[in-house]
Image: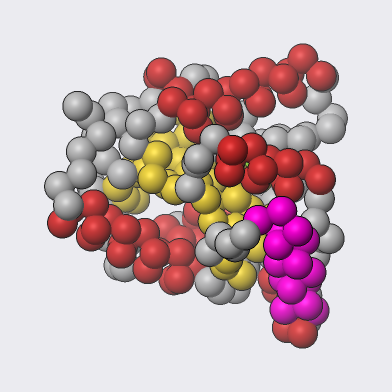
Amino acid sequence: MVIKTAEFVKSSQKWQDCPEPTMPEYAFIGRSNVGKSSLINAMMNHKDLAKTSQTPGKTQLINNFLVNETWSLTDLPGYGYARVSKSLRKDFEKLITNYILNRRNLVNLFVLVDIRHTPQKIDLEFMQWLGESSVPFSIVFTKADKLKPGASERNVEVYKNELLKTWEDLPDLYITSAEKKEGVDLILKYIQKTNDFLVKNKVRFDD
Ligand code: GTP
Ligand code: MG
């Protein structure tokens, strides 16, 4: 997909304040600092459309972007950021779960995990919850440039085996690097294909 336009629409504190749910929406989620905002920028071919930071917890609101005037991209706050108070963490959790369960035009959630780490309990539990809540999602491995190619593949295999302990089928998996713009084309291809399907089947979200 060619990105002709990508514009920031608004930041919201709760799902009710997000833009009207008229267009298909794709959201990025994952632990704080995993690279959500960086990946969005890489996909949009834009340096700082979504704000990035070396300090975890940068994205604290639901940020909506409009792409090619036909679909919507959401940058969500990271979960599991240890350095905020328990009550604030609970607030984030509530914001995220309410968005996921109520956003009518949410087509797919991209769950980002750092390719360097072994499967983390918090991510696995989150995906389990998505499954139980029938929320469609894909897994996106980030920061692949930080590993040698062989190591990336090995870590993905470990992750797949972990998932297969509880899942019958694996979700779509993407190996990416925002730094090297790797894997972003495959995500965009998936979004294009899905958008085409929705148009062909005249799917509407707003009625
Ligand atoms: P929060 O908004 O705080 O939840 O973080 P985030 O998930 O949006 O992460 P962000 O995109 O801000 O990136 C966090 C840090 O990781 C920044 O220092 C980025 O430069 C770095 N980073 C992100 N993606 C990559 C990547 O693909 N490769 C490398 N080497 N660094 C990356
Ligand atoms: Mg961010």
Residue farthest front in this picture: 168
Residue at x 24% of width, y 58% of height: 197
Image height of 96 relative to 110, above or below:
above
Of residues 186 and 156, the one nearer the viewer is 156
Residue 86, x across and y down, in percent: 81, 19
Residue farthest top in this picture: 87
Q: Main secondary structure of the magenta part?
A: helix
Residue at x 84% of width, y 32% of height: 82
Image height of 180 relative to 8, above or below:
below
Q: Is residue 32 left or right of residue 117?
A: left
Q: Is residue 65 left or right of residue 130?
A: left
Residue 185 falls in image quadrant: bottom left
Whether residue 202 appears in this view of the structure is yes
Q: Number of numbered discs present?
A: 0
Q: Is residue 10 left or right of residue 80?
A: left
Residue 194, x across and y down, in percent: 32, 58
Residue 119, x across and y down, in percent: 80, 56
Residue 19, x across and y down, in percent: 33, 28
Task: Please provide the residue range marked out in magenta.
Answer: 151-167
Image height of 136 relative to 138, above or below:
above
Whether residue 51 appears in this view of the structure is no
Give the position of the N terminus as an image quadrant: bottom left
Residue 76 falls in image quadrant: top right
Of residues 124 and 48, the one nearer the viewer is 124
Q: Is residue 5 left or right of residue 32?
A: left
Residue at x 59% of width, y 38% of height: 132
Assess whether residue 46 is covered by the magenta stretch. Answer: no
Assess whether residue 162 is covered by the magenta stretch. Answer: yes
Residue farthest bottom in this picture: 150
